Amino acid sequence: MVRAAVLRAQGEPLVVTDIVVPEPGPGQVRVRVVAAGVCHSDLSLANGTLRQPVPAVLGHEGAGVVVSVGAGVTRVAAGDHVLLNWAPPCRKCWFCLEGEPYLCARAADAAEVPHATLPDGTPLYPGLGTGAFAEETIVFERAAVKIPSDVPLEQAAVLGCAVLTGAGAVFNTAQVKPGQSVVVVGVGGVGLSVLQAARIAGAAPIIAVDVHPEKEALARAHGATHFLLSDSPVAKTIRGLTDGRGADIAFECVGIPESIRTAWASSRRGGHVVVVGVGSAKAVVEFSALELYFFGRTLTGCLFGSTDPDIDIPRLLDLVADGSLDIAGLVTAEVSLDGIENAFADMRAGRGGRTLVRF
């Protein structure tokens, strides 16, 4: 048995308790989790904004060491350091074969299959297929991405979602070019990753927008050249910083209608608005037919940074190695497994960047 943070019902607090993790079956990998980032998607799964079979072990942004592997596993072996991939491509469906593995039709399959049990035998589901808020977890082979053993696992954990999503939005979805102006609405873990990637891409100016004034220092440390509070005349100020036009590319990293409209209004005619934030199915964003026509903007959804982890993780690790990408700086707090509800509270209040669970 190992300790884990269990969601017994959506809308209830997570409970830290013992769970039973079995030996890996065919095609499965057992991983000792070293660190796991607390992502807003975990909060959305916990509060019912996103669908989640229960009871479940949440956590999808994790890194650890392979304990054992099941029959037929060839990607990793016991002792390997791995990053958990919550959206592993099957490499066989139409989307994968079309070069869009981030839209894989089978990426979410593992989340519907119990991976462990409570001591009384009740099946447990892995949040987003990974179940990283536990001392150990079971994942399918394609969800374990091997990384070099010299990469600190407590830093690598945030690569699994925040950095892949944020940096991928810049490098893959928007393909930001040097000199393009960028606005980032919402500077949590994903937004901070967008800021860093925009800086690496050579964007200028890079304008961060958030509801919390205390986020300014953090945003500037990660690449923002300007910081605006969302209750200010954001669009007008951004036009003043971009020769009257608006930003070339606006990244929305919150997932609510108001911030999507802010990103839209902050971009120039012919600009590109990239929605990175995960919102509720009940949250509706409205546009008039005239503005869609007149402004000529492109509005793009961005799932998992349009990434292929097997390709993009090595690229990001190269940026970490040469000092361009600061993944350690994204972590502004660390907690034990018992502190996850405190991490959720900080997230609701908009405090800090990424909180890391250390095992």
Image (cartoon, grey):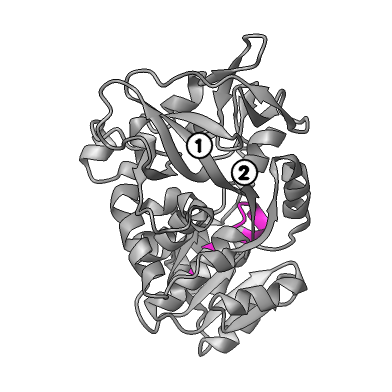
- Which mark is drawn over residue 217? none
Task: Rate crowding at label 1 as few (under 14), some (14 to 19) or many (20 or more) other CA atoms within 10 Å.
Answer: many
Q: Who is closer to the viewer here, 259 or 2?
A: 2
> In the image, what residue occupies the spot 76% across and 73% down?
214
Relative to 32, does residue 258 appear above or below in the rendering?
A: below
In whole angstroms, how far apart are the C-alphas of marks 1 and 2? 9 Å
Circle 2 sits on which residue? 359
Amino acid on which disc 2 is placed: Phe
**On the picture, is 268 further left or further right than 149?**
right
Residue 64 is situated, as x and y percent measured from the top left of the image, at 48, 43
For label 2, the SS is loop
Residue 178 is situated, as x and y percent measured from the top left of the image, at 36, 81
> In the image, what residue occupies the spot 51% across and 30% down?
137
Q: Which residues are magenta?
A: 250-259
Query: What is the residue that sits farthest to the top in this orientation?
Result: 121
Asked if residue 255 lies in the magenta stretch, the reply is yes
Q: Are marks 1 and 2 in contact (CB under 8 Å)?
A: yes
> In the image, what residue occupies the spot 21% across and 38% down?
97
Amino acid on which disc 1 is placed: Arg
Using the rendered view, name the quadrant where residue 324 is placed. bottom left
The C terminus - image quarter: top right
Residue 345 visible to an observer of this rendering = yes
The N terminus - image quarter: top right
Residue 148 is situated, as x and y percent measured from the top left of the image, at 34, 54
**On the picture, is 205 further left or further right than 317?**
right
**On the picture, is 69 further left or further right than 285?**
left
Q: Who is closer to the viewer here, 148 or 262?
A: 148
Residue 73 is situated, as x and y percent measured from the top left of the image, at 28, 28
Residue 105 visible to an observer of this rendering = no
Relative to 1, does residue 167 appear above or below in the rendering?
A: below
- Which mark is drawn over residue 32? 1
